[in-house]
Image: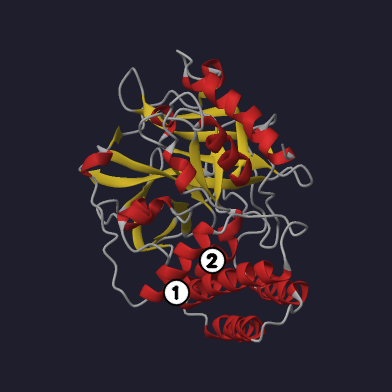
Amino acid sequence: MGRHSLVGVILALVLASVLVASTPLSDTEKSTVSASQYGLLDNLEESENLLKISKRHAEIHHVAKREAKMHAVSKRQASDTSRLEALQLRTALMFIEADQAADITVALALAEVFNKINSTLQAGRGGNPDAFERQLQGIAANVSANSVLPKDCGRSPSDSGDPLRGSHPWVVSVGYKNGDKDTIGCVAVVISRHHVITHAICAATTKYDHVLLKNTAYKVSNRWFHPSLKSDDDVTNGHNIGIVMTEKPLVFNDELQPACLPGINDVVSAVGDGTTTLVGFEASPRGGVTKYSWANSKTFNSLLCFEALGALGTGGGQSRNSLYEILNRHHMCVLRPFKEAELSVTVDQDPSTGRVEVTGVGPVTDPSSNYPMAFTLIQTHTFWLELMVKNSIRLLL
């Protein structure tokens, strides 16, 4: 049995122990950040679903579907041809992201790389995947260098201790106002003075027209979701992410700060595992809504999760978890119950800088099992996020 298959079986045993448990994993670790009333929770089932998009990128949807089926494999295991095919699909995805951001310079540079990779594949030559990889990294690095995102991000001024167990000033909500009452529809993370990131359906729901804080509400001026999404069925494809832009700038203070994004050329290992912190909103027993955090939440990245779910569903007549069919390199699995953490994001502290980064949004799960949660990775969308933020600023001018 191969190393990864063995790991998959071990993780399957961990998953199985959780699935039959009578209480949520480490429930005592879930703590309320603020006991203050914070509006009401919207009935998510009644939320508008506006992912009825035009078909001007129909061909890109096909690309996204193909990419979703190509699971991440280490370079040592991949042939030059398969690496080139993966790079071709990645380039196509970056191209439609640049196209949505209306960044012609970046789109043309990506089109040139795409055509070169395509010519190499058609000629049947092995090519040099590393050279194409470096070109894509160079394009991404240039985007990052021109970013308008705040440099002083990921801080929690009011927390002198562990910021992951503090007030989480980066996490806000998106919803709507009804007179003097606020209704929360979804959770979001601040990344600039005008931008928060959330899941795609939240960004597409026009009813959610305010970014809500405890005592302030900011009117939404624009919204976008990832260009690979063509319908609500696509939110499981690993691109369940959107951006909401406010009319007026957010005022940063001790209770409101921007989180950092992962490095644009960082690499997330498909066979990595670790822990993360969930932060979100839930109904308070005393009425209203409170912000909570769930520390030390076990994570395993896409390939490990894929193999664990595969091993779990191969014996004992047990049906296979539906996440097995959708997991790809844009996902991260978190071993927490979806029903208790649906309105959540994941955040982590960069050990080298001490700053807090947003790492996941838009969780989905197998409704029949409730475990695990599969979040959309932020790192594989940093290129799109930085492009959209930079090019949307001109709308304010």
- Taking 373 as reference, is 384 above or below it? below
CB contact under 8 Å: marks 2 and 1: yes
Q: Residues within 10 Å of mark 2 (few under 14, many from 20)?
A: many
**Image coordinates for residue 29, horizontal then vertical, percent:** 57, 20
Find disc 2 in the rendering and name its residue. 384
Instruction: Residue 390: name its quadrant.
Output: bottom right
Using the numbered discs, state the Cα–Cα distance from disc 2 to disc 1 in whole angstroms. Answer: 9 Å
In the image, 207 versus 367, the foreground residue is 367
Q: Is residue 396 visible?
A: yes
Residue appearing at x 34%, y 52% in the figure: 201
Residue appearing at x 55%, y 26% in the figure: 15
Q: Amino acid at mark 1?
A: Gln
Q: Amino acid at mark 2?
A: Trp
How many labels sit on residues? 2
**Image coordinates for residue 237, horizontal then vertical, percent:** 44, 54
- Taking 312 as reference, is 131 above or below it? below
Give the SS element for disc 1: helix
Quarter of the C terminus within the rendering = bottom left
Instruction: Residue 203: name its quadrant.
Output: bottom left
- Taking 8 as reference, is 87 above or below it? below
Q: Is residue 364 visible?
A: no
Quarter of the N terminus within the rendering = top right
Q: How is the image coloured?
A: secondary structure
For marks 2 and 1 on the same chain, the one whose residue lies earlier in the sequence: 1
Find disc 1 in the rendering and name its residue. 100
Give the SS element for disc 2: helix
Residue appearing at x 70%, y 29% in the figure: 161
In the image, 19 versus 50, the foreground residue is 19
